[in-house]
Image (cartoon, rainbow, N blue to C red):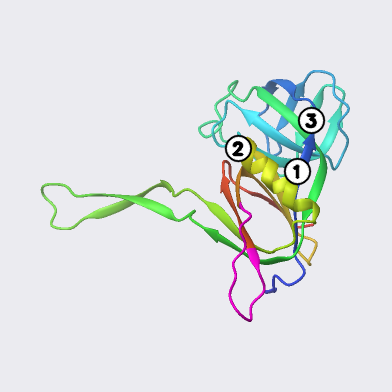
């Protein structure tokens, strides 16, 4: 059993990507293996996977093993052929080349992601029953100390203006890391409250489920 404080967490957003490489097949395995065209990926590379599998697309993974024609996505279990139909996982993969640190983060809060339910009742029953039907949309909200001279300022402006899906990384003090993929918004007009530091806000609408590694 363990608990931890968020003090010391560092954030970054993807600044550049290598060209996307086609994925002709994705295996059903405890760790999915992607069949690719010629690639130069190496162990530890961070890649975005776009796939015909709805539960896999727009997610960011770490490369566990790689050859010139295959990539294994660390920890991505696709053994269920119900959730991941055989032959439907083809798509593309692209490598994150560089990251821009997001510094002076005052708060980073998550919203959404709650389980949603469908309620039903049979005519012969006098009570209702619920079954889970999915989860609500999830987003992150960042409050950042205002300083337009820092690298993340222009990086967030550009990401928000493009509305392109862009990866983000949260590195916890324990060494655990969380990878996200979403669309940024950025309000560079600072708050101005007497006696409090000026801050700006960035929003991040997730487009795929986060992926977390223990170390």
Give the left or right position of residue 40, taking residue 196 as reference.
right
- Res. 28 visible in picture: no
Spot occupied by residue 37 in the image (x, y as percentages of width and height): 79, 18
The residue closer to the viewer here, 172 or 120, is 172
Spot occupied by residue 159 in the image (x, y as percentages of width and height): 67, 41
Spot occupied by residue 16 in the image (x, y as percentages of width and height): 79, 37
From the image, tell me which residue sits under label 3.
Answer: 71
Q: Is residue 198 above or below residue 73?
A: below
Residue 14 circle label: 1
Q: Is residue 10 above or below residue 60?
A: below
Callout in the foreground (2, 3): 2
Q: CA distance from mark 2 to mark 1?
A: 13 Å
What span is colored magenta in the figure?
A: 187-199
Looking at the rendering, in which quadrant would you find the C terminus? bottom right
Q: Which residue lies most toward the bottom here?
A: 195
Mark 2 residue element: loop
Residue 163 circle label: 2
Q: Is residue 215 above or below residue 168?
A: below
């Amino acid at each position: 059993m363990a608990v931890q404080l968020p003090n010391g967490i560092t954030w970054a957003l993807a600044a550049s990507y290598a060209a996307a490489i086609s994925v002709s097949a994705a295996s059903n395995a405890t760790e999915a293996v992607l069949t690719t065209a010629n690639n130069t990926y190496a162990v530890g590379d961070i890649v975005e996977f776009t796939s015909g599998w709805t539960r896999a697309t727009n997610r960011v993974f770490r490369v566990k093993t790689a050859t010139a024609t295959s990539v294994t996505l660390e920890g991505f279990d696709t053994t269920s052929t119900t959730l991941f139909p055989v032959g439907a996982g083809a798509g593309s993969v692209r490598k994150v080349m560089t990251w821009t640190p997001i510094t002076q983060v005052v708060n980073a809060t998550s919203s959404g992601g709650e389980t949603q339910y469908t309620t039903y009742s049979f005519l012969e029953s006098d009570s209702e029953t619920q079954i889970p039907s999915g989860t609500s949309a999830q987003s992150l909200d960042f409050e950042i100390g205002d300083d337009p001279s820092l690298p993340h300022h222009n990086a967030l402006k550009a990401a928000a203006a493009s509305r392109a899906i862009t990866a983000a990384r949260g590195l916890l003090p324990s060494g655990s890391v969380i990878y996200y993929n979403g669309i940024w918004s950025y309000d560079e007009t600072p708050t101005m409250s007497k006696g409090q530091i000026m801050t700006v806000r960035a929003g991040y609408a997730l487009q795929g489920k986060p992926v977390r590694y223990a170390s």
